[in-house]
Image (cartoon, grey):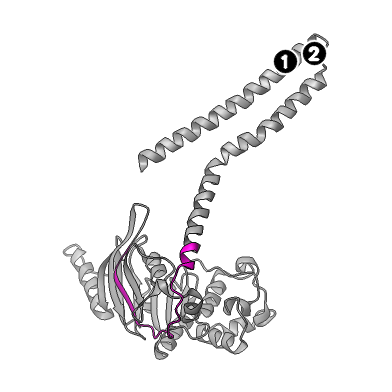
Amino acid sequence: MTKLQTEASRQSGLIQSLSSWLRQSMQVFIYGVGAWLTLKGEATAGCMIASSIIMGKALAPVQMGISSWKSMIEARGAWSRLDALLSDLDKRETMELPPPQGNLQAEHVSFAVGLVPILRDIHFSLNAGESMGLIGPSGAGKSTLCRLLLGLWRPQHGTVRLDGADIYTWDPQALGPWLGYLSQDVELFSGTVAENIARLGNVDSEKVITAARRAGVHEMILNFPLGYDTPVGEGGAVLSGGQRQRIGLARALYGDPRLVILDEPNANLDEEGEAALVRAFAALKSDGVTVIVVSHKPTLLSGMDKILMLKGGQIALFGPRDAVFAKLMEAQNTQRPEGRVAP
């Protein structure tokens, strides 16, 4: 892989150097011919300068095309992948299934990007209403696993099942209302607060307010200039990072989701926002919603039923919360140098 990248960079640099040399050589040639014709009285200095400008304009698109060739290749590759994904969506099983209860199983799931493995042999199960904290170092595959559990991506090996059915074969339109997802990078759409919480569908005022209350943002939204009708701007530009995240949480809780996955939901939250998040977890648990939370803060994970720790794309630890935390504490104490007292 490194050898191919080095060869591609070398070829790209060579082509750009040749194009630059060709353009400068042509300019010198034009000036030379123009000067020779001017001395012979067959052209003027203005004609020489005009010819140089015309030649530069003619060669500019060629050089621009060469310099942007890499971007065009990447755009073509992205279009091919997107076309394949959308074509695959059209082939999904469309038979209507009953509303899910939230029983989730990952059966020896593996996923790779190209030749690079991201997840290997991930297997666990959660009963409806159980909660799980997902922890691990950066790059361990936590966000990738979240997308697989939601059926957004298909694993190369293994199956993710929701109530016994392969979640990837569910009709996305039918499954969507039963899922809630908050990604690391919260993306809001140009529209009002209510429209974003309602997932850009028909705004049901009662459901929107219920979701906002469950997320603990009802009072915050009422303080906006137009309340729920406040435009958020493209990408939520008029809101702070914490406000976007809390509205994104309300969007994830909109309706009656049976599986909610939150990826670093406290990344931009203050103490008030974290307290509201903990209350939201308790409400989801009482409603029998299956919850998965990616976080490293003990305050958020203290109410989880189970903990799954990823390391290097594999399961390092999985089990009841107290048992996993006890093993982590034991490992930390073992690694601590002898004679050193823990702070």
What residue sits 34% from the left and 63% below the top? 137
Which numbered marker is on residue 182? none
How many neighbours does mark 1 have within 10 angstroms: few (below 14), some (14-19), or many (20 or more)? some
Look at the numbered disc 1 and give the secondary structure of its residue: helix
How many neighbours does mark 2 have within 10 angstroms: few (below 14), some (14-19), or many (20 or more)? some
What residue sits 63% from the left and 24% below the top? 24
Q: Does residue 337 appear in the picture of this structure? A: yes
Look at the numbered disc 2 and give the secondary structure of its residue: helix
What residue sits 65% from the left and 22% below the top? 26
Q: Amino acid at mark 2?
A: Thr
Q: Position of residue 25 (x, y in %)?
A: 63, 21
Residue 149 location, quadrant: bottom left
Q: Amino acid at mark 1?
A: Val
Which numbered marker is on residue 33? 1
Give the alpha-carbon distance from disc 2 to disc 1, as whole Å: 8 Å
What residue sits 25% from the left and 71% below the top? 317
Q: Earlier in the sequence, mark 2 or mark 1?
A: 1
Judging depth in this view, the residue of 186 and 176 nearest the camera is 176
In the drawing, does residue 122 fall left or right of residue 269?
A: left
Judging depth in this view, the residue of 307 and 14 nearest the camera is 14
| Looking at the image, residue 320 lies above or below residue 187 | below
Give the number of callouts.
2
Q: Tell me which segment is drawn in magenta.
A: 87-110
| Looking at the image, residue 6 lies above or below residue 226 | above
Q: Position of residue 74 (x, y in %)?
A: 51, 48
Quadrant, the C terminus: bottom left
Q: Residue under circle 2?
A: 38
Labels 2 & 1 near each other (Cβ < 8 A)? no
Residue 304 location, quadrant: bottom left
Quadrant, the N terminus: top left
